[in-house]
Image (tube, rainbow, N blue to C red):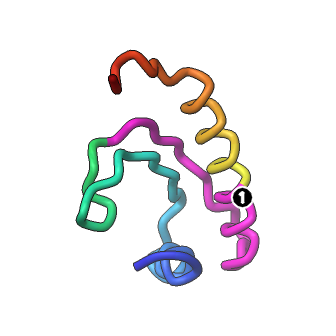
Amino acid sequence: MFGRRVHQAVLDSGDTETGVTIHHVTNDYDTGDVIAQCVVSIIPGDAVITIEERVKEVEKSLICGVIQNWNYSETE
């Protein structure tokens, strides 16, 4: 499950938070080792679109931080 379906499932479940995970890419979807994670709160009255917007902002920030702090010598 990905995209808006994830956000809808979070709303339907009544969860109070969701999150963002940056991980190494493997041949299987979302199975690589975790590089970084961040919690995103669900705010009362949220809709799928507001969750999606907030998650995307966190994703941008988190991936930029991961790239800036990546130790490229570890990948050689």
Task: Please report the residue visible at 34 percent of the width from the left and 19 percent of the height from the top.
Answer: 74
Please state, as top left, top right, bottom left or bottom right, where the N terminus lies in the image. Answer: bottom left
Say above or below: 1 vs 57. below
Q: Is residue 44 on the magenta stretch?
A: yes
Task: Please report the residue visible at 45 percent of the width from the left and 49 percent of the height from the top.
Answer: 21
Task: Please report the residue visible at 24 percent of the width from the left and 66 percent of the height from the top.
Answer: 28
Judge left or right: residue 35 versus residue 19: left
Location of residue 3 in the rendering, given as x and y in whole percent from the top left corner: 55, 76
Q: How many marks?
A: 1
Q: Is residue 46 on the magenta stretch?
A: yes
Please state, as top left, top right, bottom left or bottom right, where the C terminus lies in the image. Answer: top left
Q: What crowding class fits label 1: few (fewer than 14 Cα within 10 Å), some (14-19), or many (20 or more)? A: some
Say above or below: 30 vs 13. above
Q: Quadrant of residue 51?
A: bottom right
Location of residue 2 in the rendering, given as x and y in whole percent from the top left corner: 47, 76
Say above or below: 5 vs 76. below
Location of residue 14 in the rendering, given as x and y in whole percent from the top left corner: 49, 73
Judge left or right: residue 17 versus residue 65: left
Front residue of 31 and 9: 31
Front residue of 59 and 17: 59
Point out the stretch of residues depicted in magenta: 34-56
Judge left or right: residue 72 versus residue 56: left
Location of residue 34 in the rendering, given as x and y in whole percent from the top left corner: 34, 41
Task: Please report the residue visible at 61 percent of the width from the left and 39 percent of the height from the top.
Answer: 62
**Amino acid type, label 1:** Arg
- Name the residue tied to disc 1: 54
Helix, strand or loop for disc 1: helix
